[in-house]
Image (spheres, rainbow, N blue to C red):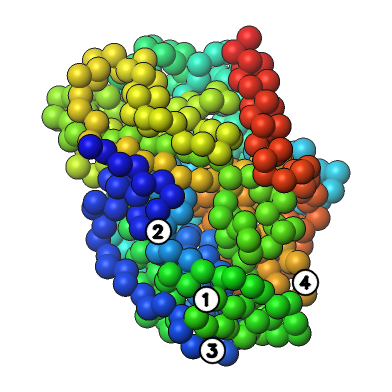
Amino acid sequence: MLNPKTHSADYPDSYYAATREYSCDYPKLSEAKDTQVCVIGGGLSGVNTALELSERGYKVVLLEAFKIGWGASGRNGGQLIRGIGHGTAQFANSIGVDGVNALDHMGLEAVDIVRDRVKKYNIQCDLKMGYSDLAHKPRHMRELETEKEWLDSVNYSHETRLLKQHEMHEVVGSSNYIGGLIDMGSGHVHPLNLTLGEANAAQAQGVEIYEQSKVVNIEYRERPVVKTENGQVTADKLVICGNAYVAGINDELEARVLPAGSYVIATEPLPESVWRRVLPKDMAVCDLRVALDYYRLSADKRLLFGGLCNYSGRDPKSIVGTLKPHMDDVFPYLKDVKIEYQWGGMIGIGANRMPQVGRLHPNVYYAQAYSGHGVNATHLCAKVIAEHISGETRRMEIFEKIHHMRFPGGRRFRSPMLAAGMIFHRLKDLF
């Protein structure tokens, strides 16, 4: 019987956990450490912040409550897509036109950081370039046309192409879409292997990594003191990368991010004749609806199909039972294909869908709320924080000028409010 194990202390029973390329048995913190930078969180944000800083010569200690890549970093759909937020133009009043342009270009840079890191450290994570947005309605096509015009205007260095309805068979074997936009500068990846490979690289650079070392208290002093159940770390600077799992670490950060459930199913390996019909170019794809579907092929040609963003705080009774009908709607000819894995977890959602990067104090940094676009955005935000700590750039100050609303009330009240908002936007999308 399948067991998603979405909230246990070990990895969920996912396709990613079953196909790990890297061992990760880091010790538990059991003593007092003194370092230059302490990083809380062993996901993509924390691991890459530690790696960026260690490459710059900093002494870093990283603390993870469970396992490296345990949260969304090791459970997501593996989509590596340009961009770091939703609708950057909305922030022009606070960051100016130059700030908006900087964010847009950082969204392109974010993918390059991942590609360069995989190449530099020879990380085995099934990185494959090629992605397509999928349009259900004319409004979606107008959005894609505008996006294509912008990419052309900034001399985007990768191939892009708009697809009309009769051309969609080149990308996806479904009649559900009226068009799309191919982007060969985006792609897909095995996210858990990416995270674990980067953690190995960080450790090789001198980062001390500790698992099963949940933070129980932080003393915000001139040199912050981070306490775990069996040890503590005193550091010159602290970086908090808890994201959807920041609860209990800092009340201010928790109030700005809402954990939302996201889920994925994986089929049995598909015969070549079938997978070439499903995704002929082996691209990652994603539709443009609010209640979106996203899917791709794994290295061994399983269909990984995700969606079902859930704000209730409760997992569905059956992930397969809830997601499989969506997959069958897109690919009716896969109705009898066996589902071999199902899993889920929490992603961090912010009210304005822009990653939150900044400082709680001059020596306490944070990054969170990637709203489903974390594979690339985490890498960019980690680089921005490391640059600021080392005095290289002031790009982080662009992020700090963006206002992030606190969700009113405790989580008990925030989830129903956001769920109601989601229903409104789904109805708006439908009609």
Q: Residue at x 40, y 53 (%)?
A: 8
**Mark earlier in primary sequence (1, 3):** 3
Name the amino acid type tagged 4. Answer: His
Q: Is residue 401 visible?
A: yes
Residues under numbered marks 4 and 1 in contact, where contact means CB atoms less than 8 Å apart: no
| Nearest to the observer: residue 26 or residue 110 | 26
Nearest-to-viewer mark from 1 and 3: 1
Tell me the CA gap for discs 4 and 1: 24 Å
Label 4, residues with CA under 10 Å away: few <14, some 14-19, many ≥20? few
| Nearest to the observer: residue 112 or residue 412 | 412
Q: Which residue is mark 4?
A: 361
Name the amino acid type tagged 2. Answer: Ala
Tell me the CA gap for discs 2 and 4: 31 Å
Query: Residue 9 bears which disc, if any?
Result: 2
**Mark earlier in primary sequence (3, 2):** 2
Nearest-to-viewer mark from 3 and 4: 3
Query: Residue 229 bears which disc, if any?
Result: 1
Quadrant of the drawing holding the C terminus = top right
